[in-house]
Image: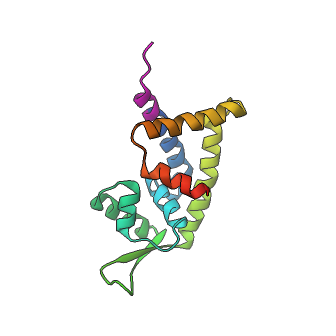
């Protein structure tokens, strides 16, 4: 029996996105917007839009649209960097902090559902296999960042 790993990975990603979107739906956000808020919350200093483009491998127009919608909804604010007037820094607002907290809880619940009937050993093996598959495909800046965050 042939497995279609890419299709299975895509289905799991779709399921997770749907659950995350449902979790923040009452605040009129999508999972993609929530991920941007999460990135902002974990940034050492307020990033520029270019930082988000590189971190998420997104185009400038996509990031501009995401940031514009988040700013319109008062989740974040863009301010000109006083040291570099060409750069706008992105600052999280209290409403953005609130959605981050809700997303964090939702992610925990979703991740628990993913592995709910796995043994502790299967949970470790599942994570290990996922990381190994990512590595086999050439690695990822996101995977490397995850490893840095653990240290």
Residues 130 and 87: in front is: 130
Residue 133 on the magenta span: no
Q: Identify whether 3 is placed above or below 103.
A: above
Which residue sits at x=64%, y=47%? 108
Image quadrant in which the C terminus is located: bottom right
Q: Position of residue 22 (x, y in %)?
A: 53, 47
Q: Image check: 3 left or right of 94?
A: left
- Which quadrant of the view contains residue 100? bottom right
- Which quadrant of the view contains residue 110? top right
- Is residue 66 among what the camera can see? no
Residue span colored magenta:
1-10
Q: What is the magenta segment's predominant secondary structure?
A: helix
Query: Which residue is farthest bottom?
Result: 82
Q: Position of residue 2 (x, y in %)?
A: 42, 16
Which residue sits at x=50%, y=74%? 45
Q: Identify whether 52 is placed above or below 89.
A: above
Which residue sits at x=47%, y=74%? 46
Which residue sits at x=45%, y=67%? 73
């Amino acid at each position: 029996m042939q497995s279609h790993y890419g299709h299975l990975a895509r289905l799991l990603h779709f399921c997770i996105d749907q659950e995350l979107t449902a979790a923040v739906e009452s605040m009129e956000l999508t999972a993609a917007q929530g991920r941007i808020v999460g990135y902002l919350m974990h940034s050492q200093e307020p990033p520029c839009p270019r930082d988000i483009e590189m971190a998420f491998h997104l185009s400038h127009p996509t990031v501009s649209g995401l940031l514009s919608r988040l700013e319109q909804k008062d989740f974040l604010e863009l301010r000109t960097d006083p040291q570099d007037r060409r750069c706008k820094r992105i600052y999280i607002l209290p409403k953005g902090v609130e959605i981050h907290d809700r997303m964090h809880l939702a992610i925990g619940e979703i991740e628990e559902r993913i592995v709910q009937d796995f043994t502790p050993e299967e949970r470790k093996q599942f994570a290990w296999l996922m990381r190994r598959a990512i590595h086999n495909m050439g690695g990822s800046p996101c995977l490397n960042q995850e490893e840095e965050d653990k240290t």
